[in-house]
Image (cartoon, grey):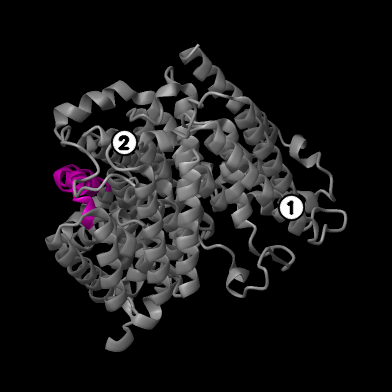
Amino acid sequence: MTDRADVWSGAVLLAVALAYGTAAFRLPPGGGEPGPGFLPSVFAVLLAALSIGILVGGLRRSAPSARGSSEAEATLPTESTVEPAAQRSARSWMAFLATVAYAVLFAPLGFVLSTAAFSTVVTALFTRERRWLLAVPALVTIALFVFFRVALQVRLPMGPFG
Amino acid sequence: MTPDLLLEPALLALLVVGVLLGILVGAIPGLTATLAISLLLPLTFQMSAARAIVMMTGIYTGGIYGGSVAAITLRIPGAPASAMTMLDGHALARRGQAGTAIALATFSSFVGGIAGGVGLLLFAPQLARVALEFQSPEMFALVVLALVAVATVGRGSFTKGMAATVIGLMLATVGIDRLVSVPRFTFGSVDLLVGVPLIPVVIGLFALTELLHQAGQPEDVKGTVGALSGAGFADWWPRVREVGWKTFSKSAIIGTFVGALPGAGAAMAAFLSYSEAQRSSPHPERFGTGIPDGIVAPETANNAMTGGAFIPMLAFGIPGDAVTAVILGGLVIHGITPGPQLFGEAGHLLGPLFGAYFLSYVLILAFGLLLIPVFARISRVPRALLFPLIGALAVVAAFTSEGTTFAVLLTVGIGLVGFLLRRFGYPLIPVLLGLILEPMLESNFRRSMILSGGDPGVFVRSPIAVVLLLASAAFPLLVMRGRVRANP
């Protein structure tokens, strides 16, 4: 984790703390005992203090920090020296946009069409092999349909097939 | 009790089916034991009360265990309680030792489950009495300890861990205030009035975050880990011996006791147990890198919790966690009212319950060890198949859990937040713990203050609360000291 990342994340969290705190201080304070706004105000102050600590720490250090999240470190990928970082980052954002589209279209398009389309896009982010692009969407759609609709008898939106 | 159960093949078959269904559903990210019992509850309506109890017990214990499988192989906890198992379990799996990690989780689950059952059988009245000593100030102090402890564990920055915890606490404040019915942070949205539901957060935070993270890795179709090894007895048994009986015992006691506290749940048992294992370890810096103690402690505790959680349910009719709350509903549907009268009027059902409980853990040990080669291969499934499946499963599970497009969009939003937090080096587990524990923190804090007429001294008049609050203050210092000693 670089210092710049700490500066940016600290600044964003400070903004979140200020916005949340502003809303929290507008909540009824309670008469005598702590009301619904009391603990949220405490949380806002706590996050503001912590984010200032992260931000200042990031500004102070000049060399990249060796400390990071254990979770992040536990899953550090094997860095590719061939593929540019921007290209890999773009794939993450593509996956995000595909998931947003899937979430929005899930009910109107129905389970089958939306799942097949989403699986096709996401498979394409992981491989360009045609056999995978054809097999995975079909497999994913059938497997989830059998599990949720047939085995668990959960009602799924079926769109044009409904 | 157990022999009777073995003598009736239909009951035994139901237990086997229940355990296997529980393991299957628990192993699927986003589908928790609570959801499994809720979905499968209608199946028990046509059964006798004894058969329903046996099946629900199997689903419950199988579901709690099954959550560890996805946590180890995919780095996606099948249930919130498996989040701590993910840290060391997945780290071990990435070294090609998914088999060892699953075997450790299986054996720990068995030990924890049996210990929790013994606690239930022998010490239910005593545990229930001690649990009743935990009034609002003590519960508040216990939650503070759990929150501080989880921000400290792992190898990351304490400041970032605390910031992640506070983000989780803030998320939990969205919705109608539980004491005075004032909407908070809903921005006029009707969907947000009920608050931020847990399942979409778990799915978003871990399943979608993992999808977005993996999509940004170099293109290939290989699985997420290298060659597999470590599934044999000779591979994992020495690791069990290396961990030692102290970690097993402490975790079992923590799990059983937390289970006996109404509402505390498996996640808190696992968090506290992991933190204590790290605090008392001579190598705290190795936690999060694939250390066996990091798998044994949470798995022993969250399974011991299942025994403990039955105590308040059976003794007072108060569920110990969300799953026992659903089981309680199931029992009521079958005309049984848990509470003191259960021991009299429906005492004949306690035999099947206890018998099913103990046998389910024997089945978990057997199935878990037998299925290791199958489970371990999950982490070898090609990424081009695994992640489209996980992404689609996440969306369908989020839709199934809440039944609204809003819940799905919330899941996706949480997934993005989790992805960014992880990218900037913030741990995700404290976010989950903050969300889970905030309702307990706030309700117990405000109730204590109301009952004391606004006097904050209520928290220092209870010796238990004082000890827990002092432990909360000392915990980060002790862990930091351990880290400094390890890396002078």
Segment colored magenta: B361-385
- Quadrant hosting residue B95: top left
Question: Which residue is drawn at the image coordinates 72% and 68% (left, top)?
Answer: B181
Q: Which residue is mark 2?
A: A79
What kind of residue is marked 2?
Answer: Glu
Residue B81: tell me if it is visible: yes
Callout 2: SS: loop
Q: Which percent across, then down, holds residue A78?
A: 29, 36
Question: Which residue is drawn at the image coordinates 22% and 66% (left, top)?
Answer: A140
What kind of residue is marked 1?
Answer: Gly
Question: Which residue is drawn at the image coordinates 87% and 54% (left, top)?
Answer: A32
User: Which of the two labelled residues, at mark 2 and mark 1, occupies the earlier sequence position?
Assistant: 1
Is A33 placed left or right of B165 in the picture?
right
Is A106 placed left or right of A128 in the picture?
right
Instruction: Kindly report which numbered mark, 2 or 1, lies closer to the viewer in this rendering.
Output: 2
Q: Using the image, determine if residue B229 lies above or below residue B7.
A: above
Q: Residues within 10 Å of mark 2 (few under 14, many from 20)?
A: few
Most extreme residue toward the left is: A131
Residue A162: tell me if it is visible: no
Q: Which percent across, then down, holds residue B233?
A: 15, 31
Q: Label for residue B297?
A: none
Magenta span contains residue B145: no
Q: Viewer-proximal residue, B77 or B10? A: B77
Q: Which residue is mark 1?
A: A21
Q: Which percent across, then down, holds residue A155?
A: 34, 79
In space, the residues marked 2 and 1 are separated at their CA atoms by: 40 Å
The rendered magenta stretch, by its main secondary structure, is classed as: helix
